[in-house]
Amino acid sequence: MKVGCVKEIKSHEYRVGLTPACVEAYIRHGHDVFIENSAGINAGYSDEEYKAAGAFIVDDKREIFDKCEMIIKVKEPLRQEYGLLHTGQILFTFLHLASNKELTQELLRSGIKGVAYETIETANGQLPLLKPMSEIAGRLSIQEGAKFLEKPFGGRGVLLGGVPGVEKGKVAVLGGGVVGTNAVKMAYGLGAKVSVLDVNVNRLEYLDDIFGGRIETLYSSRANIEKILEESDLLIGAVLRHGAKAPRLIKRDDLKRMKKGAVIVDVAVDQGGCVETSKPTTHDDPVFVIDDIVHYCVANMPGAVARTATQALTGVTLKYGLEIADNGLEKAARENDEIAAGINLYENKLTYRAVADDLGLQYSDLRKVI
């Protein structure tokens, strides 16, 4: 199979879909790999390294889309890339379709076969390709939130860990999954007072156990959400519904309950956000203020730590990409339920029910179309 990897064009997206080590693996399996000129430079990988691994370096992005049967990216195509896709082509990347009807409809029109990193799912409900990026985003959420709590950035002027004789900052994390757990680790490590909310009591018991009772675990009821809104300096939105829009747990009127200069980091923004006032931002202009509350809503947070994030991401995507390239998507999906779960689009059909339901579009059963 001809496999292509292009340079990301999303604002401040420095990750790349393949490393030179990945290229070597594809070539050992008998595939040809085409890399766009300077695609990996911002993640620390030179064209010379890709050449040494056996890749063809191509200057024209369109040439890669035209000749390759599978395109491996990090982020969803932007408008400038819509016209480059063609019928039957496999697109292997993060898609996050549930919050983007325009993108979904464009990809349906293009006739591509879209395999979304974020919906490849194991038999026990784990999301192995989303997990490392969730770990990074969770850790970054505290790092960025702590920065924007500083007064020069519009925050309350609170140091999360405090100092002796002074009250510590208070952090609330909505969601105790991978993002939330990593946010709790970072906030606790900085010395903040930490509360985590979830509807899964078993998860709360787990978090209470691993932190030795030194964090507050709360059932995510409306009353408890209102309580932590009033107390918190930093709120992390870490709620996930597999492949679907995040639930809106914080409404516009809820901002009035929060302290002036408090910070919200909505990690769920790439799935629509769990805060009503959230809207995607970029690393160029990461925050905005509504009702005196600072909102940080960067939709590609891990792109800021491109080297770490690229290595973490490609470490888990490689085996799935190789399986698709070796067997073709159809055979790979029939033999591997995890890959089948990742197929959101098949030619002109939408094959992931949660996306179809959220966007009000027609759903097609994948088993009937491949």
Image (spheres, rainbow, N blue to C red):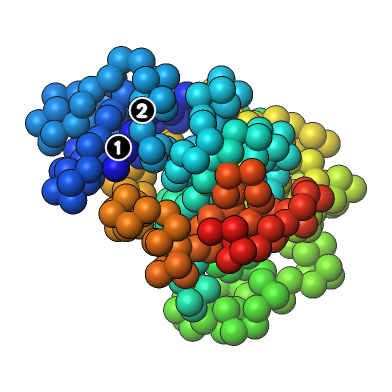
Report the residue that reaches farthest toward the right: 253
Name the residue carrying label 2. Answer: 67
In the depicted view, which residue is nearer to us: 213 or 288?
A: 288
Q: Residue at x 48, y 77 (%)?
A: 123
Q: Residue at x 45, y 63 (%)?
A: 333
Q: Residue at x 63, y 75 (%)?
A: 217
Residue 238: x and y in percent read: 61, 57
Q: Secondary structure at mark 2?
A: helix
Which three-letter amino acid code belongs to the residue tagged 2? Answer: Lys
- Mark 1 and mark 2 in contact? Answer it, CB < 8 Å: yes
Residue 345: x and y in percent read: 59, 49
Which three-letter amino acid code belongs to the residue tagged 1? Answer: Lys
Report the residue that reaches farthest toward the left: 52
In the depicted view, which residue is nearer to us: 335 or 170?
A: 335
Return the mark for residue 2.
1
Marks counted in the figure total 2
Residue count near mark 1 (Cα–Cα under 10 Å), binned few <14, some 14–19, many ≥20 = some
| Quarter of the rendering containing residue 157 | top right
Q: Residue at x 45, y 58 (%)?
A: 330
**Cα–Cα span, label 1 and label 2:** 7 Å
Q: Is residue 308 visible in this depiction of the protein?
A: no
In the depicted view, which residue is nearer to us: 18 or 224?
A: 18
